[in-house]
Image (cartoon, helix red, strand yellow):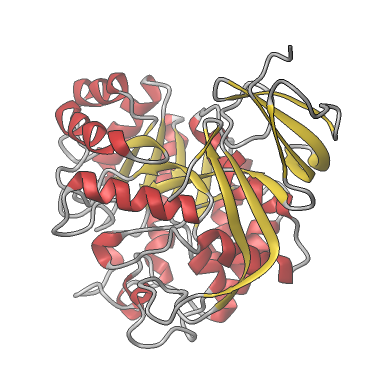
Amino acid sequence: MPDFDTVIRSTRVVVPEGIEAADVTVREGRIEAVLPYRSITEGPGPRIIDLGDRALLPGAVDLGTGVHAPGEELADSYHRAGSAALRGGVTCLVVSPAPARPAITCADSLQVHQRAAAGSPVAIAFLGGVNQGAGPLELADLQAGGVVAFQASLSDGGAPDMAALSDSGLRKAMVQIATLDSLLIVHAEDSAELGTPAVSAEQRPPRAERRGLERVFSAARVVGARTHIAPFTAAECAALLSAAEAAGVELGAHTCPHYLCLPSEFPGPDSPVHGCRPPLRSDANRKALWSALLEPGSALATIGSGHLPAIGLYTLRWSLSALWTAARRRNLTLSHLARWTAQSPADLLGLARGRIQPGFEADLVAFDDEATTLVPENDPGPYAGMRLTGRVTRVWVAGRETHS
């Protein structure tokens, strides 16, 4: 009797090495083996699911997801976000500590979120919030409680619960997080460069990102901390990321599909995407951002939905399709999609997810990369009314097929 529960086969399985025909075997929620196509025969034994030519991708790991919607019970927000994630091919949400009630800045608030998330249909990981008063004991308690990394802001990225860090606060946090052998994710817009009120693109210029990135680079260079900028939108700052790599600083970056797909000239005046922090930038910036992403060995390595109900930005449902729509126009492959949305964020956080590889969680997505969908005009996200290519058809979380 074969030592696995389920076989999912496809002529196009997206593994780390590329795309191949394979039988993916699953045992007790994990991938047991990736075997030659049709090497498992029908008959008594494991259940066989044949996807034919439909692609099989690793489930996306969505870094820095905002979950809590204003005025909604926290548990309801987790369930709602999890359902949207499933429809969008996301099998693990890595939850931002703020804005939320309560913000995840101590072990007690982390436990509140863990209880609220218990019924989520997808896997949940947590980021711990760092504010000006955070000390080594608080951060150590958060890590002991299960956070997979930490998040801070240089402006209003985590407001009102995570006020902007000063340079001394940033260095202090980096020292403590480096001691914990963890990662610091930074919203890098510099508060001193933002206008008042900072609610429009004109009040949130690219120089705010540049100045913030310079501050992060300087601190990380001194401390030696692993750091990730999220979200990264100002393509003019890509040279700073390259400079960090040349200096031996572990500094990476993360962006979102709406920054790659929607130039500031495109959305209508009422689109929720105008509330993005940082804002959408010009079409020229969007094209340059793609160039930075596609640069060999780019430090801009992860892409996530940027879902943030607190500002009315609901993106989980359509982000994978939006990204694929833009990627296929550039003759890119599903391997790029899997690397940016699943493998790289999971590797960044040390999660055994995001790869179709033995020993990893069996978080899998059947994806029809030719299907087109017209996003309803009344959709609350930024893709309303757009025709997107790529549709999630089935999802497995830890080997179990799950429905939204």
Residue closer to the observer: 87 or 112: 87
Image quarter in which the N terminus is found: top right
Query: In the rendered view, does 261 fall on the left or right side of 117?
Result: right
Q: Residue at x 48, y 55 (%)?
A: 87
Q: Image point 69% across, 45% down: which residue? A: 56
Residue 65 appears in the picture as rendered: no
* Camera-nearest residue between 273 and 11: 11
**Is 35 located above or below residue 63 in the figure?**
above
Name the spot of residue 382 as percent of width and height, x first.
42, 74
**Residue 57 visible from this viewpoint:** yes
Residue at the spot 68% in from the left edge and 59% down from the top edge: 368
The tally of labels here is 0
Position in image of residue 305 (x %, y %):
46, 57
The image position of residue 114, as x and y in percent, is 26, 32
Examine the image and state in which quarter residue 46 appears.
top right
Give the image location of residue 344, x and y in percent: 59, 41
- In the image, 277 versus 70, the foreground residue is 70
Taking the image as shown, residue 68 lies to the left or right of residue 218, namely left
